[in-house]
Image (spheres, helix red, strand yellow):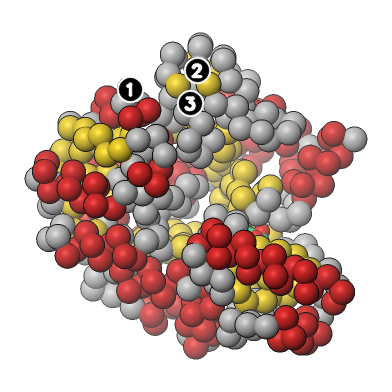
Amino acid sequence: MFEKVLIANRGEVALRIHRACREMGIKTVAVHSVVDANAMHVKLADEAVCIGPANAKESYLNKANIISAALMTGADAIHPGYGFLSENADFAEMVEAHGLVWIGPKPEMIRKMGDKVEARRLAKDAGLPVTPGSDEEVATVLDAIQWGEALGYPVIIKASAGGGGKGMRVVQRADDMEMAFTLAQNEARAAFGNEGVYIEKYFTNPRHIEVQILADNYGHVLHLGERDCSLQRNHQKVLEETPSPALNPEERERLGKMAVDFVQKIGYSNVGTVEFLYENGQFYFMEMNTRLQVEHPITEAVTGLDIVREQIRMAAGQTLDIRQEDLQFHGVAIECRINAEDPNTFTPCPGKIGQWHVPGGLAVRVDSGMYAGCDVPPNYDSLVAKLIVSGRTRNGALMRLKRALGEFVIEGIQTTIPLHQAITESPDFIDGQYDIHWLEEFIKNRKA
Ligand code: ADP
């Protein structure tokens, strides 16, 4: 097992990895930018190295500085967390080239899945149903118009190298295609340095349902059930729950098998998430995320497994010692992503936190790197805390969620807690009746 792991991230995710390491007796090295010198992830780590200025490009995305920090401190391995360099195959290769272990899937697997067109091809070859769409990148407006005709409007243009909900454009009719196509290519070039785009049928009321998988280096693959991540704004997840209120046991079993089968066929290892759209009883493969996910704690809450611990063990070459048939799922878990944003306009609200009190009690978990008096810098993602609650029943989890949301005291910055409170009061959410478009409608109606 590793003696020392460098955590190439910040905030709650860096803390999450640190906690797993500590419990495994592994020393941790934090990296930080100048503005994060007093951050909690820095305070709790065994060692910390400043890797650059506030701008993420020069610090948390600075590959050379991170590798230097690992070599300087004698770390054995690097955990990238999620975001930043977690799905960067070049960085993973660089880590390995310097004799360090990359805690994640093999770089070539990250590269394959990072090309969404290639990922769709692999899924299709493995016999998975994929969202109807172009099998290749679409190079010209004429081709795009032909795909629009073939698939039937609406369609969605997506960046092949896309991620984080960026570089997607919905096209309602043929007349809009030329403009949308050009804009999508430009956006893709600006965001990902690659203008490649492809086109999919745009689903009008699907759910986003994903499967967490664990796969060791010896071909043992497990799924840890599904997460329903349909509550989204701007294609970004806001609240997640497991199990999905929409699936029946037969569908759940079919979905888990599909994900495991895919991962086995492509020879994937470490943790990953296979994402599907679900509409009218059908699943459609959308993409695979080759990293730990923000919403992994809800899966931990219902399985009792520490996913980061398993991830580190697998990266160290250990075998999974859990079998699918031994896994048990208990109850329902829900996560709210709490952002430092105006809850009505969603404008980021960085600043200095005054009072800070987080909820506690049975089956309540708060993952956060914040504390009273700390700064929320304007330079990074606006997530300040994740609230994860579980209950024996969905109603029990909901009641607990409402109770816990009401206990937060966060002064000095605005947060999206009022939005989460409004969601938990909504009859549709209480009934589990929502799709990926529901939240945006809900927000619109709330303002009206
Ligand atoms: P990213 O990697 O940027 O997160 P995804 O491919 O996972 O992109 O898509 C993000 C979200 O966009 C999905 O969760 C879903 O809400 C929406 N979306 C993606 N593809 C489609 C589609 N074909 N039809 C409808 N919504 C879609």
Q: Quadrant of residue 442?
A: top right
Left or right: residue 145 compared with residue 84? right
User: Where the C terminus falls, by quadrant?
Assistant: top right
- The disc, 2 or 3, on the residue closer to the chain's N-terminal end is 2
Element type at marker 3?
strand
317 is higher (above) or lower (below) than 31 = below
Which residue bears the numbered disc 3? 376
Q: Quadrant of residue 395?
A: top right
Which residue bears the numbered disc 1? 38
Q: CA distance from mark 1 to mark 3?
A: 11 Å
Q: Mark 2 near mark 3, Cβ–Cβ under 8 Å?
A: yes
Q: Position of residue 362 (x, y in %)?
A: 48, 27
Element type at marker 1?
loop
> Which residue is rendered at x = 49% and y = 88% of the image?
125
Residue flagged by tag 1: what amino acid is it?
Answer: Asn
Q: Position of residue 135 (x, y in %)?
A: 59, 85
Q: Mark 1 near mark 3, Cβ–Cβ under 8 Å?
A: no
